[in-house]
Amino acid sequence: MVLPSAYQDFVSDPGNAGVDSGSAINTLGWTYMVQGQFPEAVALFELNAQSHPEWWRGYSSLGAAYMKVNQNDKAIEVLRKSLELNPNNQVAKGRLKTLGAID
């Protein structure tokens, strides 16, 4: 897994001590998504899901990134995990419908 330098900058900055790293890394991942840097976004979202395994939003974001790189089987798996953690996650439901994984 190759993490972007922005992640290294974030974790090495003492000013970020105590910052909710899950949310911050998720935001950073979406920055890469918007810029079309999908491998970097996938790497960040994978790290986030591993580091915060009980956080539904991390899996939801990872599912979106997997969809962008056409790893639809992985997307379905993590989107289902997101729904398991938060059955009200309408974004994950919509993505699963798009993937044909639910009606």
Image: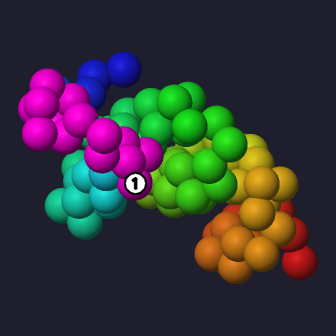
Q: Amino acid at mark 1?
A: Ser
57 displayed left or right of 23:
right
Q: Place residue 14 in its image quadrant.
A: top left
* Residue in the foreground of this view, choosing between 48 and 16: 16
Residue 76 in sight here: no
Q: Residue furthest right?
A: 103
**SS state under label 1:** helix
| Residue 17, magenta (yes or no) | yes
Q: Residue furthest top?
A: 1
What residue would you read off at disc 1? 23
Residue 94 in the image: x percent, y percent? 69, 77
Look at 70% across and 72% down and name the residue there: 89
Q: Quadrant of the C terminus?
A: bottom right
Tally the numbered discs: 1
* Residue in the foreground of this view, choosing between 96 and 92: 92
Residue 63 in the image: x percent, y percent? 58, 53
Look at 56% across and 37% down and name the residue there: 52
Q: Quadrant of the N terminus?
A: top left
Q: Place residue 71 in its image quadrant.
A: top right
**Which colour style is shown?**
rainbow
Residue 59 in sight here: yes
3 displayed left or right of 8:
right
Look at 83% across and 54% down and name the residue there: 84
Q: Residues within 10 Å of mark 1 (few under 14, many from 20)?
A: some
| Residue 37, magenta (yes or no) | no
Q: Residue furthest front?
A: 18
Residue 82 in the image: x percent, y percent? 71, 55
Q: Which residues are magenta?
A: 10-23
- Secondary structure mostly seen in magenta is helix
Compared to residue 50, the image places residue 28 above or below, namely: below
Residue 73 in the image: x percent, y percent? 70, 44
Compared to residue 52, the image places residue 61 above or below, namely: below
